[in-house]
Amino acid sequence: MDLKSMVIAVFCGSKNGNSPLFETDAAKLGRLIAGNNMEIIYGGGSKGLMGAVANGALEEGGVVTGVIPEVLLKWESQHTGLTRLLITEGMHSRKKIMYERCHAAVVLPGGFGTLDELFEMLTWNQLQIHDKKIYLLNTANFYTHLMEHMSNMNSMGFLYESLPSKIHLCETPEHIIASLIDNLSQ
């Protein structure tokens, strides 16, 4: 598959978190995705890691589509400089549009909403609603404990497939891009 036709969903926090590495890695990931001629679809916000990813991609001349529900327009301050901004009625329709339009998903640090998006994608993979690769950016070991917990879920017999078949833990934005290119160009 040609990288120019790749659309990468990016799920992340609307806050920056308490480590400067979170914002730095988010902006770098946006630049790298755009620099490799892939498009981004994300939550449409201008704040936090969402804004950093979008701004990084836009600085590189990338194509960025935001998808934001009406209820979050006040909370997340929609980004006004995007290639496209889609406004949905609710959270479910937002996630559905992002899942349907992407070829793979990258999950950066974030809060409850980010985890909701991650686990919905994992669940849809398990139910074979889609088979899209999911990549976690483990900036500052943010997802180390979660991966340990999911390994425990697997060892205790609660998962239908092994974790490596569904989720890829990456330590740097460069590792995410290399993995995306390797997996998506096959």
Image (cartoon, rainbow, N blue to C red):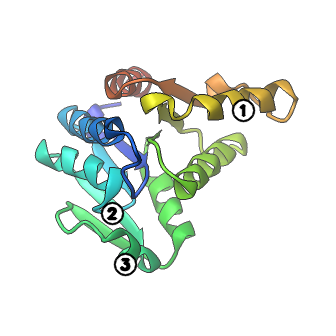
Mark number displayed over residue 74: 3
Q: Are marks 1 and 3 in contact (CB under 8 Å)?
A: no
**Which of 133 and 77 lies nearest the eye of the viewer?**
77
Q: Earlier in the sequence, mark 3 or mark 2?
A: 2
Tell me if 92 is positioned left or right of 26 in this view: right
Tell me if 54 is positioned left or right of 132 in this view: left
Q: Position of residue 21 (x, y in %)?
A: 33, 35
The residue drawn where x is 38% and y is 65% is: 67
Residue type at numbered disc 1:
His
SS label for mark 2:
loop
Q: Position of residue 118 (x, y in %)?
A: 57, 46
Q: Are marks 3 and 2 in contact (CB under 8 Å)?
A: no
Residue type at numbered disc 3:
Lys
Question: Alpha carbon of mark 2 to alpha carbon of mark 1: how far?
Answer: 29 Å
Mark number displayed over residue 45: 2
Quadrant of res 160? top right
In this view, the mark in front (2 or 1): 1
Quadrant of res 87? bottom left
Q: Which image quarter holds the N terminus? A: top left
The residue drawn where x is 53% and y is 69% is: 91
The residue labelled by disc 1 is: 149
Residue type at numbered disc 2:
Gly
Tell me if 139 is positioned left or right of 24 in this view: right
